Amino acid sequence: MKTWKKVVLGIVATPFVLAALLGVVYVYQDSIKKDVKEGYNQKIETGGDLESKYLLGGDLKVKRCTFKEEKPISKVSVFYPEEMETSGKKYPMILVMNGTGGKVTKYEPVFRMYASWGFIVVGTQDKGTGTGKTTVKVLNNMLDMNRDSGSVFYNRIDTENIGLTGFSQGGAGVFNVLTKYEEGKMIKAAAPLSPVSEYMTSLVTDYTYDSSLVECPIMILCGTEGEFETETVIPLEELVKQYDKISSPKVMARRTGMDHGMMMSYAGGYVMAWFRWQLQGDEVAAMAFMGESPELLRNSAYQDQRIAL
């Protein structure tokens, strides 16, 4: 990245073109990230008991089904607790939005971990989710299956408890789903991870957004290392600006020592605690964010923590 930056600074005279070229660089970097492997969550060092508990996964066995879709979605993969097929219960649903060049098949262990805690978890092969359009389409398709007596998801989705998370471009897409679509009102809680900042989206993308329009509880987690986090995608100054604009219940933190590409998997402990609390009413998970001494504020693996709930 440093070599790229030197080349860019040597060639470019205007801030706009500089931002555009840096945007190309982070798109390239996102697209070459390695797949997350099984057992990844057992190798991550954590700074809190609750972070560790929810990162290691739940007790439920997980199944997966897939559906073909038109491009750019191409395929939808849904992970769900095996017991769903016979329990007669409804389950909260989490939609996951890919970063640039990402796809569900690169992160299946993350989806399985989420589902093991009692969630229906939905991902796609869409490599450009920023506008939110394809995620809204997938949401509507899942709701159709919830009404279809021939579907495995018939009357199994708890439509009052739907969550949304996304990484990088997908993190920006989270804001767009929440604020630009009627369906965004169905989202009860959100967790964008290292989202491309408002400032950057306004310069180099077609998925610019306004964080001040968010109405649901939201948690923004980012890393601290690498020029993507500190200078390009979501530098601290831009993260604080976005956080300050949000009037709904909110949390922000940066995981110390993590670069941009690591947040999709490394943030999973608190992402799961957040959704367990917000969508399932898990009072133990709530202690990561609430009470006299929330774990997130005490966690030495994080910095720049802020909570306003």
Image (cartoon, grey):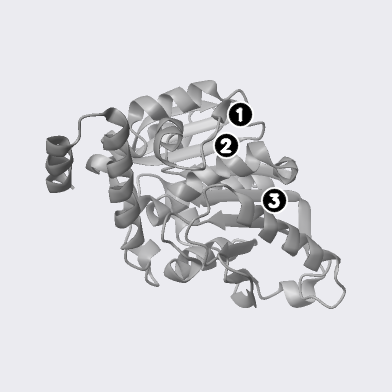
Is residue 110 rendered to the left or right of residue 179? left
Mark-to-mark CA distance, 3 and 2: 13 Å
Q: Which residue, given by chain and number where applicable, does mark 1 sit on?
A: 249
Q: Is residue 282 visible?
A: yes
Sequence-wise, which precedes: disc 2 or disc 1? 2
Identify residue type, mark 3. Ile
- Residue found 35% across the figure and 50% down from its top: 46
Three-letter amino acid code of the residue under disc 1: Pro
Q: Residue at x 62, y 57 (%)?
A: 134
Q: Amino acid at mark 2?
A: Ile
Q: Which residue matches tag 2?
A: 218
Asked whether the beta carbons under mark 1 and mark 3 sit within 8 Å of each other, the answer is no
In this rendering, the answer to whether 63 lies above or below 119 is: below
Among the 4 quarters of the image, the one containing residue 84: bottom right
Q: Which residue is mark 3?
A: 162
Q: Which sits earlier in the primary sequence, circle 1 or circle 3?
A: 3
First in sequence: mark 3 or mark 2? 3
Residue 256 seen anywhere in this rendered image of the structure: no
Q: How far from the left and from the top, in percent, is residue 12?
A: 20, 35
